Image (tube, coloured by chain):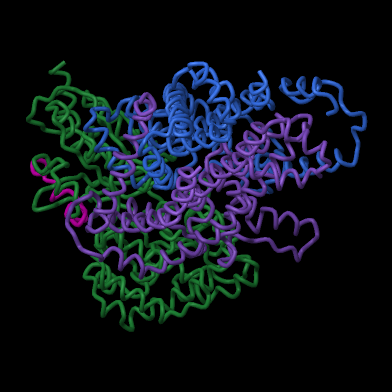
Amino acid sequence: MRYRLSAAVLAAGVAFPLAAQATDLEVTHWWTSGGEAAAVAELAKAFDATGNKWIDGAIAGSGNTARPVMISRITGGDPMGATQFNHGRQTEELIEAGLMRDVTKVAEEQGWVDIVKPASLLDSCTVDGKIYCVPINIHSWEWLWLSNKAFEDAGVEVPTNWDEFVAAAPALKEAGKVPLAIGGQPWQAGGAFRVLVTGIGGPDLYEKVYGDKDADAAGGPEMAKVFDAVEDMREMSAGSNVQDWNQATNLVITGQAGGQIMGDWAQGEFQIAGQVAGEDYSCLPGLGVNEAISTGGDAFYFPTLDDETESAAQLELASVMLDPKTQVAFNLKKGSLPVRGDVDLEAANDCMRKGLDILARGDIVSSGEQLMNQDSLNQINDLIAEFLATPDMTTEAAQERFVDIVASAK
Amino acid sequence: MTAKIASLPMILTASVVFAGGTVWTFVYSFTDSGLLPRLRFVGLDQYERLWSTRRWLVSIENLFIYGVCMLVFSLVIGFVLAALLDQKIRFENTFRTIFLYPFALSFIVTGLVWQWLLNPDFGIQGVVQGLGWTSFDFDPLYDPDIVIYGILIAALWQSTGLVMCLMLAGLRGIDEDIWKAARVDGIPMWRTYVFIVIPMLRPVLVTALVIIASGIVKVYDLVVAQTSGGPGIASEVPAKYVYDMMFSSQNLGQGFAASTMMLLSVLIVLIPWAYLEFGKKKHG
Amino acid sequence: MDNTVSADLRDLDTSGPSGPRPRRTFSRRNIFLYGTLLVIALYYLLPLYVMVVTSLKGMPEIRLGNIFAPPVDVTFAPWVKAWSQACTGLNCDGLSRGFWNSVRITVPSVVLSIAIASVNGYALANWRFKGAETFFTILIFGAFIPYQVMLYPIVILLREMGLYGSLWGLVIVHCIFGMPILTLLFRNYFTSLPEELFKAGRVDGAGFWGIYLRIMVPMSLPIFVVALIIQVTGIWNDFLFGVVYTRPDTYPMTVQLNNIVNSVQGVKEYNVNMAATLLTGLVPLAIYFASGRFFVRGIAAGAVKG
């Protein structure tokens, strides 16, 4: 048993000094849709190959449903073996309270610092020089998805940047289409807004406002331009009449809407509908103006456990997650980009390749969650959602309130 | 003495869980607790922020409109349905189940179904327009001014059945002789209901009132499923503000401050009621 | 309605009057009565119709379509999927997975909470000990506390009691949160019963439990049914407590329902959503229908006379 186990560990490309015993480890996450579950299955398969057993604890409904469960379990003295969190600033307090396990040891042994690209992902896992989580994928927000059919119907060229898109809006409207589809939930408004800040205002402005919480920049003329674009967005999105992001994507797929600003996960919807990138739909990273993408994503954390066997298994899980084979298998299913620069995604399509190229060029910004806490981000989401739904709200008034939020943001 | 021992679970629940939990919430509303509760006091900061947040103000206004309509319509519809069913009709069991079944469905799904029915493009409006009445306009969910009524329609659908059942239980507890006496005296049926039966139903009415009211204060899932608080923030409600603050924004302190305000307003209504209810008994 | 005997017969009937009926079935009163009931029933049934129809369609048809249109190709695949194939993460055995867990949680929680609350209500209505009113007021206040606010304090409480993660911990939580409304329900119903009943019991020498079991409970079937309806629905449909206060091996079926209905990312399978909801709702629905026969008029009247 011992021999077979360590052989398996070695085969997985892991030199692991602890002679670990096999054990069950419960892993909680909120990946429950078809593609997500398939991606998780890859992780479980890789972990089971080490002789341990992955006990799945999935809870749907995004972090808002799952998070209270996870936090209650951890503080209630009944922690799971590992748990998903968006990396960023969500877990700082749990780490400070000593409830999370430090995995620096594995990270140093395997040289995560050299492997993980971009480095900001690992920075987000680091508190006081110690590493507490494993980044597992990269999701980016900065995509404008366009329906080629809609533009054909309207008799205009498929735009190659935001300005052309705005110029094409009247023709789309005349053809009975919604130029820009957007779901009613505030996070979609706030996300699209961040994309406009990066795309129209540029990565520097974005880092200044969200990273440095620079109120002057937030109230400046550059930002005013962004708000003008948001006003365009308000006019173009009137009549979307949908709630969920994938309903909005569906409007684009069926050609009822011209385009949608949404993260790379929208691509899964196009794929399921049998559409081909470049033929049926086009994608413009960074709105075709500033081609930069943000590098948010998901990470796994490891609550502190008393049981030594389980603690050892946690470290094994951590190293399995960054294994090149796991990374490829997982991310192809998930539709996200791997966190290692040294693996090849052969199966990637047109749009994914664009993303990989941008990543390789290093034109990246940190994700909103990495820069600002969720509280402030939600305040911005509410503001933009209200602005989009209130035709008589002026851009000046909105910008003024935006400056207030940025000034008090943490 | 037996009565006191038998009530021990109630005494413990009331004092430890509800009173204790409320005090706990109140204390932590003065802290800057984020993801985890911690005692780092910041005075009234959370309350200042709360009352300067537009979303909170909109939430309060919505709760007020929703609350008043919900109370009035639930009680009236619930009572009328119960009275109709109490006419010794055939298929009472079937009708009762039809009116009650929505209560078995979760709010999330209630919201989803009504979101479809009220969708301007393929819901009721779309279908009626498709039949040729093109000027037909019924689009509550995407009009910020009336969106709260769209939620009200779904809420009434889901919950009037239970109110009806309560009223029916009350009506069934009324002595048959009272009806006979009223009939002998030649009092018209509606007068019997209004002047004799409803006053006798007072205890059940109070129960119904509390059930409806607590449902109003806690309304959350329905809004999330139907509109997510939109368009914009036009259909936000206080409970959603509390939950979003606690679990999405990870600002427990702000969430506790908001729930303290909610509980405070409940107390303002509840304490006079308790005086009335119990003060009277001591004299009688 | 002219003689007492037939009225009493009707009272015992379960599905409606079966004794001699007034001859004029199509009287103006009846047309109005049944007409109104039918119209209202339609309003209540319309969403159900949409749900059933949707659950029988394939996804492409739903994407195209009119939500009121009957399915072109009737498929039961969504029902099968909801019951036995839908995945919670890696466990793909659908709602069936949590069904027995739900039963195991619901039965003791419902029985215990109703038992406690009815005794509370009875003590409050008929025995009024000192301080009872204060506790009762706090209890009613508790009905208005949003559950989520109490989440963390209860975690601490259960941890200290050593019940965190166990089935009994969850049962206690359900009893606690069911108590305000149920106690109010029973207290107010018992108050509305004629006080002579209670006094007669005292005269006969019956004590606290004697009066409760032999007089109060048999007279209060309709209100017990209402309590049953509230509790079965509430506990069966509860997701939050079930998922927070138990372990994955005792998750109720609503966790799966939530995973089906609430998936934020990825494709929403509306047909499976609807099938899953209807399946989950079947248990409370069965209870509503079966318990309906206890809504019988005249028990009170009979007891007073007897």
Q: Quadrant of residue C48?
A: top right
**Colour of chain B as rendered:** purple
User: Against A40, is A203 above or below?
Assistant: below
Q: Residue A289, relative to residue C149: is it above or below?
A: below
What main secondary structure does the magenta stretch of the protein show? Answer: helix
Q: Is residue C246 visible?
A: yes
Colour representing chain C: blue
In magenta stretch: residue A116: yes
Where residue B181 appears, x then y in whole percent? 77, 35
User: Looking at the image, which is closer to me, B10 or C293?
Assistant: B10
Whether residue A184 can be seen here:
no
Q: Is residue A23 above or below residue B15?
A: above
Q: Residue at x 91, y 36 (%)?
A: C26
In the picture, measured across the screen, residue C88 lies left or right of residue B234, that is: left
Residue C232 lies in the magenta-colored region: no
- Tell me where the magenta segment starts and ends, as one range: A108-123
Of A144 and B147, the residue lying toward us: B147
Residue A92 horizontal side relative to residue C241, left or right:
left
Chain coloured green in the rendered structure: A
- Can you give x and y, in whole percent of width and height, for residue C46 in the image? 69, 43
The residue depicted at 41 percent of the width and 51 percent of the height is A265
